Amino acid sequence: MNEPLPEGGTIRKLWIGETDAYRDHLLRLDRESRYRRFSGTVSDDFIARHAATANVLGVVVHGFFVDSVLRGAAELRPMGTMFTREAEAAFSIEQPWQSHGVGTELLERTLLSARNRGIKALHMQCLADNQRMQQLARKFEADLSFDFGGVVGEVDAPRSTPLSLMREAQADAHGVAAAILDAQSRLLKPA
Ligand SMILES: CC(C)(COP(=O)(O)OP(=O)(O)OC[C@H]1O[C@@H](n2cnc3c(N)ncnc32)[C@H](O)[C@@H]1OP(=O)(O)O)[C@@H](O)C(=O)NCCC(=O)NCCS
């Protein structure tokens, strides 16, 4: 399942203070991808307001970066109260990076985060004709159960284990290291 990411690409969680990068990524989506991401037509203002809420407690956004620019994202957002066991997941990948395995990797990370947060049901808003998203979700059928009913995919995430917690912590540590290396290499680049 772990295909290599497109060259130069890394995945890590977005940090507090990176909501502008998230907004800019969402604004760069082509018209169709934007429509599919939000299941309808939304304005630039709506996107800016939406991205600003990525800092809210409980929201986890995994980002796919190429040369330090955010090109893809997976948002995990709890539904309702803080103690809820349900969350919504939404994915956005800029067109040139679609169909290169990025969505697969982002969904895998999102499912791990959901599991570690005790999320039992993960809703994926998905237009009925979004075959790519549905195909992507089906790749995880072995671990998860789906009820697409045309629009919403519902996933029962298994419970967290010491191993699943460790996997997420390792991925976070790797993300920090990659970001530091990237910042260093940019500093050393001739102007
Ligand atoms: C939907 C989306 C998240 C999928 O991510 P992706 O990186 O393009 O998908 P992947 O490359 O990981 O491919 C996942 C599966 O989708 C299917 N797929 C890939 N490209 C496809 C295409 N052009 N047409 C149909 N199915 C396709 C394949 O089954 C693939 O698995 P495989 O390569 O193992 O066979 C991404 O395309 C995207 O952001 N689209 C616009 C916004 C959107 O639709 N968001 C989803 C609603 S929340």
Image (spheres, rainbow, N blue to C red):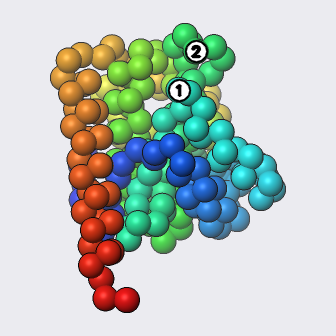
Q: Marks 1 and 2: CB-CB under 8 Å?
A: yes
Q: Residue 166, how many percent across, how many down?
A: 21, 27
Q: Quadrant of residue 26?
A: bottom right
Find disc 1 in the rendering and name its residue.
58
User: Image quadrant for the N terminus?
Assistant: top left
Is residue 138 or residue 101 the one in the foreground?
Answer: 101
In the visual, does 99 lie left or right of 76? left
| Mark 1, other Cα within 10 Å: few <14 / some 14–19 / many ≥20 | some
Identified at 35% across, 35% down, the residue is 140
**Disc 1 secondary structure class:** loop
Q: Residue 161, how many percent across, how many down?
A: 24, 16
Find disc 2 in the rendering and name its residue.
82
Would residue 55 be seen by someone viewing this image from the given angle? Answer: yes
Q: Quadrant of residue 191?
A: bottom left
Q: For the residue with label 2, is its CB less than 8 Å from the closest atom of ligand 1? A: no
- Residue 27 is tagged as none
Q: Residue 20, how many percent across, how many down?
A: 60, 56
In the visual, does 42 lie left or right of 181? right
**Is residue 66 positioned above or below 154 on the image?**
below
Q: Residue 177, how many percent across, how many down?
A: 24, 52
Is residue 32 or residue 49 the one in the foreground?
Answer: 49
Identified at 48% across, 35% down, the residue is 60
| Tag 2: amino acid | Met
**Disc 2 secondary structure class:** loop
Q: Quadrant of residue 136?
A: top left
